[in-house]
Image (cartoon, coloured by chain):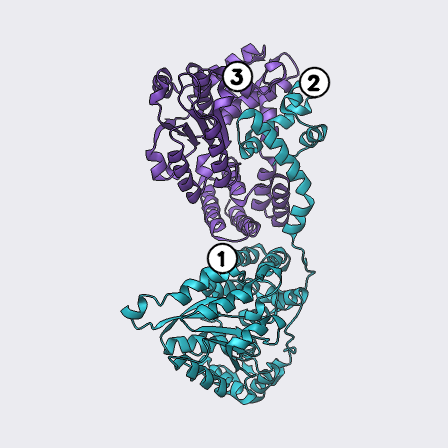
Amino acid sequence: MKNDLWVEKYRPTTIKEVIGNEEAKTLFTEWIGNKKPLKKAVLLYGPPGVGKTTLVNAAAREYNFKIIEMNASDTRSEKAVNRIATPASSFTGLDKFSSEIKGNMLFLDEVDGIAGNEDRGGVNAVIKIIENTRTPIIMAANDPDLEKLRPLKKICLLIRFQQARIPLIIMALKKICEQEQVKYEFEALEKIALNSQGDVRSAINDLQGLSEEGKILTLQDTFALSLRNKNISMDETLKGYFAAKNVAEVASFLNSSDAEYDDLLMVIGDNVARRYTDIVELAKAYDYLSQADVFRGRIGTENWHLFKYFYNNLAQVAAVNPESYKPFEFITPPPIRVITLFWTKTKRTMLASICTKIGNQCHVSKYEAKMIYVPYLRLMLQQKNKTNTLIEWLKLTSEEVTFLTSLKMF
Amino acid sequence: MAVNGEALMWVEKYRPKILSDVVDQHAIVESLKAFMRNPKIMPHLMFAGIPGTGKTTTALCIAYELFSMQNWKNFTLELNASDERGIDTVRERVKDFSRYSRGAFGDVPFALIILDECDQMTGPAQTALRRIMETSSRTSRFILICNQSSKIIEPIQSRCAIFRFSRLEKTAMVEHLKSIAKKENVNISPEAVERIVDYSEGDLRHAINALQTAAAYKENSVVDEKVVSQVIGEASPKQVQLMLNKAINGDFMEARRIMYDIIGTYGFTGAEIIRQMQKELFKISYIAPEQKAELSNILGEYDYRLTQGANSDLQLSALLAQFTKAGITLGENS
């Protein structure tokens, strides 16, 4: 239980419980409760960690909608949006008649993530879907002023979320402390709340990070908090990630970094061996990392509801044994994998060409040529006598022969 | 083709040209001969069995016997399913081929398509293949070759006569190697032949390649066990062994470096590396069998995670870390 993330544990499940933003909550509830709303889509915007996603999920529960979610890290090409979103918005579904579920809600989180070439057509696809939809579409964004989202603003109901007010955050923190039986100085909670700049999520993460079992949380403890920077670099992310004292602190650092998850996974993979010098700790950390990667694989491009498992495992990697932490020099991007594959590309290309030639003469696939022919052929070619005809028969170039004779066995 | 018409890898040079010469698959050869006598009744064929037991050779022999040594290439399309990436390439080439070879001459009313390593094809690709087999069945016959027939979808299996190639008998392999050595005027000791056969694990191509290399290596007139051992040592996956040993003996960083080295040079996939680790693990002499079983289970776990995960070298690194940890407990126990 100690390792549960409080952010998840105490995430509000009803609209009423969501902290602050009463006006936004009212507007949203009206929109969702209205059978014929003026606008078919709604865009929730505001700073991170103030409850946008939480509100959507709570509302879905209360109004019996099923949520189909797409996340920013998904490739938002028109095709991808259509594939996932269109069925959800044009079929009302049998569920509607057979159960309590009233229908689907399409939830596009972090729409300001639709960017760059990769997502070409993303915004237009979303607009098209809004135009054709029969089901409510909800979008969330941190920065609604982005030029490319302008067309969306015209056809959506805009609901603004503000930073949660400090007293409300303090109240929420107090409640958690009571439930978790954490003793505290009031000033400490105040400091955490102030420091969060209205981001409830980060405040809760900080609280969990700072509190220790059997100890009173003092104002002194909170001095360790640095002012949150929402765009910290990979290097800083790693520093905070590995130096964190427990799993919640790790999570708060992951939250504050905007590094790509896949990059993060690779870079942590490169650095984890420097972090843990004790092999038992290292093996444990790698096991979590491996599990995180497994969930990353299962998420693919659409199963974003599995994200929390990816994230929790990733957080555990850094928290295997905080006691053993000593500062170390990071291997920063590009990751070892990328560098290795870059420098060895010519080698692999040459080997592939050799294997194709072997395959043509010997009726085998490239893989079999690599496994059963190359190991022996390179030895034969090392014996310089009488190999000319063999080289000629296989049509090998002189570079390929040189490459083969100096090739180390795998 | 070959220099002076003669193949210089012995595997090719001594590849049987007629069905009767195929090594140690008598029952299969006898059934196939019936088709050769009356090609019109030949169905699609599927050859299944472990590597190096004569599946491709038998398929080629059928081509030679149906269309003659001179003409077989005009009526035979040979494809490696695992190389010809994607079913679209296969479809295009098969379509083109069956169009141009329509109305094959002589007594044979069809062209032959040999598709090797079919079990590497994905499910959808196999479904597409099934369709191709149907649409071109008037003009073509398929010989599908695979290691495991269970990896081929049911509808394709039911369209083929399936032949299972069994592991070659040791004595048959020994005889075959001896006869090649004799034709090449290589003097080889009986122990050396035995050593090659043991090492090659029933894969005749492996054995013949080892024989040819040993013949190139020999210093005096006889290929003896010493030369063979030297060749086998040089041709065994040394870096994979080294990587395993480094990990088990506590040097994780070095093991990981070697892993990247192998991936970089050879371009192996994670699954291919694990397959080799599995093979080499059981050859390590200083680990007790039950400890090997334990390590093998770790391999199995990560083999599975690889199929689920997104990043193969991360999984391999994690695997090596588990091996290093297990290695330490092995050291403490012994």
Label 3 amino acid? Tyr
Say the numbered circle drawn on residue B14.
3
As drawn, the chain in purple is B
Tag 2's secondary structure? Answer: loop
Q: Colour of chain A?
A: cyan
User: Dot 2, how many residues are within 10 Å of its Cα: few (below 14), some (14-19), or many (20+)?
Assistant: few
* Chain under disc 1: A
Disc 2: which residue: A385
Q: Is residue A201 visible?
A: no
Say the numbered circle drawn on residue A366.
none
User: Dot 1, how many residues are within 10 Å of its Cα: few (below 14), some (14-19), or many (20+)?
Assistant: some
Q: Taking B206 as reference, is B127 left or right?
A: left
Q: Are marks 3 and 1 on the same chain?
A: no
Disc 1: which residue: A300
**In this view, the mark in front (2 or 3):** 3
CA distance for labels 3 and 1: 49 Å
* Chain under disc 2: A
Q: Is residue B195 above or below residue A353?
A: above
CA distance for labels 2 and 3: 22 Å
Tag 1's secondary structure? Answer: loop
User: Dot 3, how many residues are within 10 Å of its Cα: few (below 14), some (14-19), or many (20+)?
Assistant: some
Label 1 amino acid? Gly
Q: Quadrant of the N terminus of chain B?
A: top right
Q: Is residue A390 above or below residue B305?
A: above
Q: Is residue A314 visible?
A: yes
Q: Position of residue B330 (x, y in %)?
A: 51, 46
Q: Is residue A121 above or below residue B235?
A: below
Label 2 amino acid? Asn
Q: Position of residue B94 (x, y in %)?
A: 47, 33
Q: Are marks 2 and 3 on the same chain?
A: no
Q: Nearer the viewer, residue A176 or A322?
A: A176
Q: Position of residue B180 (x, y in %)?
A: 53, 14
